[in-house]
Image (cartoon, rainbow, N blue to C red):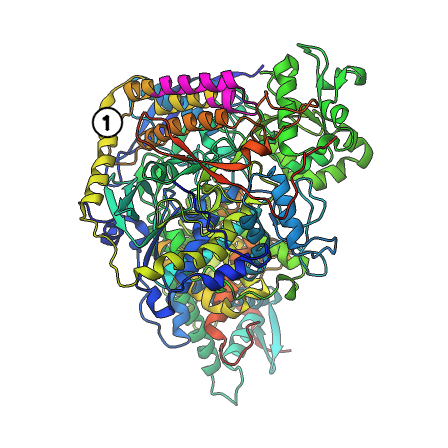
Amino acid sequence: MAAPTADRHALGTKSANNPLRIKGRDLPFPLNIYQTAVGKKWVMAVTGLMLVGFVIAHMLGNMKLYLGVVEHNGEMIYDADLYAEFLRELLVPLAPHGVILWLMRLGLIAAFGLHIHSAYSLTRMNASSNRVYESKRDWLAANFASRTMRYTGIIVLAYLIFHLADLTWGWIPNTNWEHGAVQSNVVNSLSNPAIAFIYIVANVMVAVHLYHGVYSMFQSLGINNPQYNGLRRGIATGLAVVILLGNISFPIAVLFNVIEFDPALLGSAG
Amino acid sequence: MSRKLNLTLKVWRQAGPTAKGRFEIYKAKEIPDDASFLEMLDIVNEGLIAEGHEPIEFPHDCREGICGTCGVMINGRAHGQEKGTATCQLHMRKFNDGDTIEIEPWRAAAFPVIRDLVVDRSPLDKIVEVGGYISAPTGTAPDANEMPIPKEVADSAMDAAACIGCAACVAACPNSAAQLFTSAKLWHLNSLPQGQAERFRRTEAMVETMEEFFGSCTNHGECSEACPKEISQDFIAYMNRDYIKSKVVNRRLAGQR
Amino acid sequence: MVLESKVPNGSIADKWDNHKFDIKLVNPANKRKFKILVVGSGLAGASAAATLGELGYNVEVFTFHDTPRRAHSIAAQGGINAAKNYRNDGDSIYRLFYDTVKGGDYRSREANVYRLAQVSVDIIDQMAAQGVPFAREYGGLLDNRSFGGAQVSRTFYARGQTGQQLLLGAYQQMMRQVHLGKVKVHTRTEMLDVVVKDGRAAGIVCRDLVTGDITSHSGHAVVLATGGYGNVFYLSTNAMASNVTAAWRAHRKGAFFANPCYTQIHPTCIPASDEFQSKLTLMSESLRNDGRIWVPKGHDDGRKASDIPEGERYYYLEQKYPSFGNLVPRDVASRNAKTVVDQGLGVGPLKNGVFLDFSDAIGRDGKDKIEERYGNLFQMYERITGEDPYSVPMRIYPATHYTMGGVWVDYNLMTTIPGCFATGEANFSDHGANRLGASALMQGLADGYFVLPYTIGDYLAPMLGDDPVSVDDPAFIQTEADAQGQIQRFLSTGGTRSPEHFHRELGKLVWDYIGMEREKNGLEKAISEISALREEFWADVRVLGNNESLNSSLEKAGRVADFFELGELMARDALDRRESCGGHFRTEHQTPEGEAQRDDENFSHVSAWEWKGPNTPQVKNVEELAFEEVELTQRSYK
């Protein structure tokens, strides 16, 4: 007599008895949130929100590049340089010089780390869950942005490292990089058309990433109300466009000498 | 008078779960355009049997779009090109004479092919098993009108409950995620007053079981496009919200709202 | 054999309560010592499995579907009746009981029907508690509609998907028991036979549809919740896989089959469009509220409907039945459609339909109103036929929809095989010769939730301490060998025609001779022609492939084999019942107005057929029907 069906199923011929992966023991709160994909997506959305906030603030800060020199304590100084110094002086004397900036940087590094790690592990999870069709797929809703998040994400990461190397660490040769001299560093770097080109392309990638990322964030956080859902796509598109225009304006402005660095303007006021 | 169509089919044939599959090409001749897509396959099968070839196994049962048994990839779209329509309700008049039609089974790691176009979708039952219900043993129910439910709430629950469990959402998802299926069941039960007592326990159990078999949501929206009942992705957002709440809310202190 | 209906004593209203008190109980701690096998996972099966599991029994459920949620209960559209009287329109348990007995043309068992009406109210409570999203009013209370000619609004509904929502409710409740370990579900597992040992049902033999393994399962009781046999007609509104095999196999092992000729033909289905049509689709009966049914008066009228002037249209229902008009009951509407089509007045490319015309309603109420009422149905029609019913009249024709006949059961729902029960559409009990709209869901759930779970205890209680028969018992070994033998026979016949082909041929015979109108010569012809076709089937069927993998032709062959035997019995039963009643219309027995003429003197009974072996006609046993509450009258809809 053949084994009863149920026993054979238990041996594993039925896919409901063969999970692809088994969730481990619950970690203590709040780490348990990060144990599941829905939780990871939530973390990705929260960190994404922090990063978008940073990108907006960073762009607004960069607008100082357009303001040229201003008078400060009797000295003529580029407003962008002044802003950089202001960031280091945040909450001084409550906090020592540079500490708040570093705390913010640590927060951003953590957000980046979690954003990237969750993306990495979800991508792996999806790859192991999926089987590719042999016939050609006809996409109905998925768009270029949504299907290329992992690639635009990697490009943005590479760009970030390049950007840090270029303007924060001064590792790019022949740019006369100098610590704290924001205006001169930016102009020196971006007046090289090759570097400017990298910045423009990279910011297009940032915008493509945000176009889907911001929209997706609403879903992942559960921000959904059919009465206002139309706004979500609008907000995502609007943010992507504003950030794109804002950020690519800098290299273009440098190339067309709208943003300049002229050491002659510096020195004592009056 | 109805037209007759001559078509070329590329159909996935696979002898069993472990066998290697491949596309086979068949000519479908003189197909009346009033036939449904599945009747077209019936005709092809009758021809195959007459020639001594094993017929194509394909999933089907009620053929009126409600049982959820049918479902194949037709030219790269789950359930074919007509929106809000299950494979059995797709009719051949939507095709043109001379068309080539590619037919492939649902694909997901959790859905092994059983034979040809038939896959094993049993993990969906597993998701329901761990929490897709309201615990109300027979005999315990109060009078049905004792708990009024606003019409809008009942309608919204019904929108979600309309899911037929065909798994087109999983098939269409580039990540093979079952979020639309799971969230529709969750919203059906979580939105009703009867479902509040188990709301967070249910959400936690169903989501975590779902993730043992399926991928994660990247909000492409292919699922809703493929859904023969046009179930909205909104439910996925509600599920995400309830899931995080299930982790954060202290259920001994908080009301279930 | 004397048929013991076991109807309890007492007044009609007290019978069920008395019975519940009188029958033996199994104490809660002992329930876990019993194993019950439930075949079928529709409303009747899932609700029974869930409830039995909750009570503490060990339950195993068998379904040939890939998941229990696919059962064909899911396709019911309209609603479910209950004597709640929420509308304050004078409904009561007694009225629902009365309507059901009358609607069944006085061929049902009064006590069963009364019990059905009694528990109907609990079903709604139970399903609402399960979270079934019934339609609501703005005040939050449940909405009702009237249905199927009832004079009260007692039908509860969930859009046009009531069956789906109720089935999912029962399925979910059952899955909860699966999670709790009380119910085990075997999917893609088709029951092929019942095993009888020492005169009792000992278990079942199944085939795993994926691997072809023949497996035995033993238990203390077997419940058949396997639905009706409408697919014997080939074209019906049933699902493709719906079949009679489980019930038929029980019949061959000793369960009497009651009233097989009682089949219901639903008047508003979409007509077949070509010979490859695989099934028919039902359009809700509610369409008859606003649509007018007509055919052209002239034969071979090739004109478009809109070009046919009013004077040349034949509104046959409105003319013949002025007071009910297009709203006559299902059987009357169906038969009249057949009459005009047989006269050659049919419409459509195959001249096989009648018009259901909404132009007057659209003119009167506006297109928006009609769209609001029937939008989804019109859309479904458009999808299937490619015609727009807003501008062209719909074409409709009757199709087989439900079978009132089934396995004979006593008041406890037990068949003539002790330990083998039948619930839902699979049994014969509650609808007599004709079922009212929105009553099928009610009966399936009543049996599964509120009747069987109690009555099965009466059978089980004395068996306490007995182990189920071992699956190594010769009775199981023999049944397995028989099942295996039939499969090998199919695979080795090497004929020329597919099982599908034979099914279609059988369906044509059944439809032509045992369809809406039956007549002596035709029925005799049916018996001989079905039997001849059956011989051909066994000699010439072609089943390709093997047993060891999914093989739907092989599954189909087994089902068609049983349909052949059933078809023959239907004809025999119809021939024997020399009267017309409900869905059974013998042309020899009609009133001068052409209505069904009952013969209460000679046929106020249930015909329960007893298997006497292959190629031997079944023997008829009779259960007399006593009508103590309801007075027998002639139905009239003039």
Q: Judge from the rendering whether residue C403 lies leftward or rightward of residue C82; answer left or right.
A: left
Where C342 sits versus C490, above or below?
Answer: above
Q: Give the residue at the far bottom of this rendering.
A: A94
Q: Quadrant of residue A179?
A: bottom left
Residue C341 in picture, x, y percent from top left: 63, 17
Residue C171 in picture, x, y percent from top left: 45, 53
Where B62 sits versus A30, above or below?
Answer: above
Q: Nearer the viewer, residue C447 or C239?
A: C447
Residue C390 in picture, x, y percent from top left: 71, 30
Read off the residue under disc 1.
C489
Is C527 contained in the magenta span? yes
Q: Helix or strand or loop: what does disc 1 sit on?
A: helix
Which residues lie in the magenta part? C510-534
Residue under the image location 64 percent in, 47 percent down: C98
Residue under the image location 45 percent in, 74 percent down: A107
Is C59 contained in the magenta span? no
Residue under the image location 40 percent in, 50 percent down: B175
Chain ID at mark 1 = C
Q: Residues within 10 Å of mark 1 (few under 14, many from 20)?
A: some
Q: Judge from the rendering whether residue C97 lies leftward or rightward of residue C5; answer left or right.
A: right
Q: Nearer the viewer, residue C118 or C487?
A: C118
Q: Quadrant of residue A124?
A: bottom left
